[in-house]
Image (cartoon, helix red, strand yellow):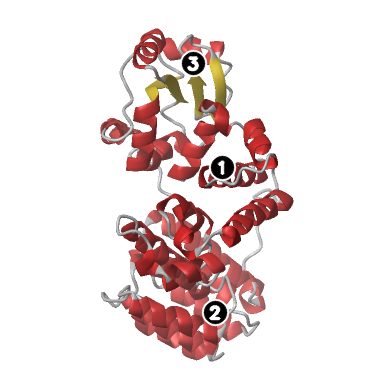
Amino acid sequence: MKKLLLNLILLTIFSAASAQTNFRHLSLSEGVAAAKAEGKLVFVDFFTTWCGPCNMMTQDIFPQEEVGDYFNENFVCLKIDAEKGEGIELAKRFEITGYPTFVVLNTDGEELGRQIGAILDGQDFISAIERIANPEKSPERLKERYGNGERSAELISAYADYLIASAYQGEEVNQELTDEAHRVVKEYFDSLTDKQRTAEENLFIYLQHAESPLDEYGRYMTAHFKKFPSTAREEIAAQIASLYEIYLSSLFAGHQPYHKEEYETVKREVEKFGLNKDKRYTPVFRLIEEYAKGDINAFLSLCEQEYKNLSETDKGNLILGMNDLIKTDDEEVLRRAAQFIRARLPEMSVANIYFAAGVIDQLESRNTQLRSIVPAVPAGKR
């Protein structure tokens, strides 16, 4: 999770956000009037200054170019503090019960729908609001269009986004809906020619549905990179780099099993695409390969040697994955792994110290010798 910003610098954030998403300093009635004059809808961000997710939306989502382009073109955008001025009455009038709440209004000031809660992905957020604002993107209409046999890129993208968003609305992921989304995209992908697969309208397949450099969409991107339109190659290249990083980070942190052939393919392609020019991945490769040999003590020795050469991101991945990586009950190894993390606490950020403490606790709780010397808590002190 990205860091929360202090209220002290919120004004700076709002200023930065306006460079992309243009939040206007208008009352609600003025905003509705402006929307009517400009042929737009009204988008209202109900927030509070103490709301962490509100701050993250302001810091990370609204400044994005694609988000700003969409909202500036289609809406008169307003930010309303639900605890100040007009916002107090409006929060009651619109029955705002959680923050952030994003409300879309028509030019009569009538609510068309709302999104409750932050969505920390720009394209996903656009899709959620578009399902409210665009009648052709409403859930009912998407289902109808798909059921009637329409298979346009625009529909497949919107319908798959809707299915995935719906799958994550409950306390548990609805696997049937995610499977249906994957089926819809795969069926569409299989129907395309090679020329169509690299067309700009179909970039959503790779940018939104590729999950690994080794899945079907990831392999297609890397194999046909030069066939994508020149205007899209920068975006495709960034997605390829992101998928390689996700794969290596997951392997590096012990979140997925090591398969030599897959790993060698990724390593070779990372070099081929020039993603290791700065040698960022060189110590990562060494550690992954050492760990794969199965000698945990040798791996920990290399961790002590290479830690200083890792990027800050990779240092965090290594520390946070240490409990998953140490798959032994050997008490000396567990002690050594915990000590490795303890020795590096002074140079960590406060946030990383918090997470590292949890990993240390996990490692030491598995060590019966360490547990046996923990002093008992006196009665009345629990």
Within 10 Å of disc 3 (Cα), the crowding (few <14, some 14-19, many 20+) is some
Secondary structure under tag 3 reads: loop
Q: Earlier in the sequence, mark 3 or mark 1?
A: 3
Secondary structure under tag 1 reads: helix
Task: Calculate the distance from the C-alpha at mark 1 to the C-alpha at mark 2.
Answer: 55 Å
Image position of 211 (left or right of 240): right
Q: Earlier in the sequence, mark 1 or mark 2?
A: 1
Position of residue 17 measured from the top left corner of the image (x, y, whole percent): 31, 34
Q: What residue is at 32 percent from the left and 33 percent from the top?
A: 10
Position of residue 47 measured from the top left corner of the image (x, y, whole percent): 45, 26
The residue to which callout 1 is attached is 155
Q: What residue is at 46 percent from the left and 44 percent from the top?
A: 123
Task: Give the amino acid at mark 2.
Answer: Arg
Q: What residue is at 47 percent from the left and 88 percent from the top?
A: 290
Q: Is residue 11 above or below residue 342?
A: above
Of badges 1 and 2, nearer the viewer stands 1
Image position of 15 (left or right of 6): left
Task: Calculate the distance from the C-alpha at mark 3 to the C-alpha at mark 1.
Answer: 24 Å
The residue to which callout 2 is attached is 335
The residue to which callout 3 is attached is 106
Task: Calculate the distance from the C-alpha at mark 3 to the C-alpha at mark 2.
Answer: 62 Å
Using the rendered image of the protein, determine whether residue 105 is visible from the camera's viewpoint.
yes
